[in-house]
Amino acid sequence: KNEQEASRYEYKIERTDAKIMKLTTKLEELEAARLQTIQQIQDTKTDIQNMEDTRNEEHAAFESAKSDDEGAAKLLAAAIEAMTAFYKNNKLPLGLLAKKGHQSKDDPEYSVDPDKAPETFSAPYGGRSSEGGGITSIMGYIKEDLENEIGTSKKAEAASQKEFEEQRAAATQVLNDLNTKKTTLEGMEAETDESEAAKAYKDLVQDKGQQGYEVHKGSESEQVCATVRCA
């Protein structure tokens, strides 16, 4: 009878050891998954930080360029206004102020008599008014280009900001999912550790009525009990 009891118990030890080995493998897989998830969490945080740094740099570059363009446009506007005022105050024809290649409506019309000899200058020099008008016209074109560039860059900046916010929202959702996964894995580890492996070992000890290290010396049961809470 004792031999039968011993044989029965040895068989139960083998089954319990096999079960504990299976649970140990499960714990190792859960731990590996948890560590992988932790790494993914860190990588996602790094991606989000890099994303934010890049967006901040792009926005700073946009603001700097916009400020330069706005400053240049203001300077051109002031120069055009000053030059126009100068020509009007001195009653000089504005020439090509409205559009290069066309006379202003305020300019006098000149005609040349091919049979008349050129006259010497008898009035004060009026300046190169046609060129003055051409310069203001060119400055106006440049100012308009700058203003168009500012408008285009604002639209591009708005689009970049929208894309960034969408990407950050998606990455943040991934991060939240990973944190949830990590918590779940930790719970599964604790449940497997405390409930399944420990219960299998305790049942075996209780069945024999002896302490685990005395009964299972050298077995898988003893090794697992050293790492899980079996007491």
Image (cartoon, grey):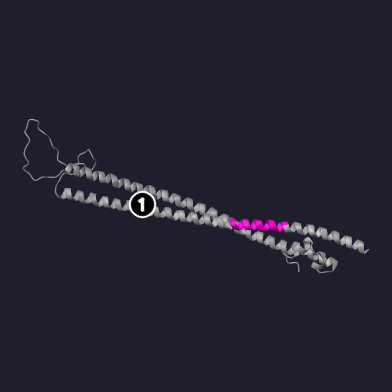
The residue under label 1 is: 65
Query: Is 36 placed above or below 217 here?
Result: above
The quarter in which the N terminus is drawn is bottom right
Say whether residue 146 is left or right of residue 127.
right
Image-quadrant location for residue 209: bottom right
Residue situated in front as seen by the camera: 16 or 172: 16
Residue 23: give x, y in percent of width and height. 74, 58
Query: Is 131 placed above or below 220 here?
Result: above
Say whether residue 210 is left or right of residue 55.
right
Q: From this viewpoint, which residue is outermost toward the top? A: 115
Type of amino acid under label 1: Ala
Residue under the point 46% across and 56% down: 53
Query: Is 164 placed above or below 118 here?
Result: below
Image-quadrant location for residue 115: top left
Q: Is residue 165 magenta?
A: no
Main SS category, magenta section: helix
Is residue 97 visible to us here? no
Residue under the point 79% across and 66% down: 202
Residue segment shown in magenta = 25-39
Q: Secondary structure at mark 1?
A: helix
Say whether residue 186 is left or right of residue 52.
right
Residue 168: give x, y in percent of width and height. 51, 54
Is residue 39 visible to us here? yes
Q: From this viewpoint, which residue is outermost toward the right? A: 1
Say whether residue 172 is left or right of residue 24.
left
Residue situated in front as seen by the camera: 26 or 148: 26
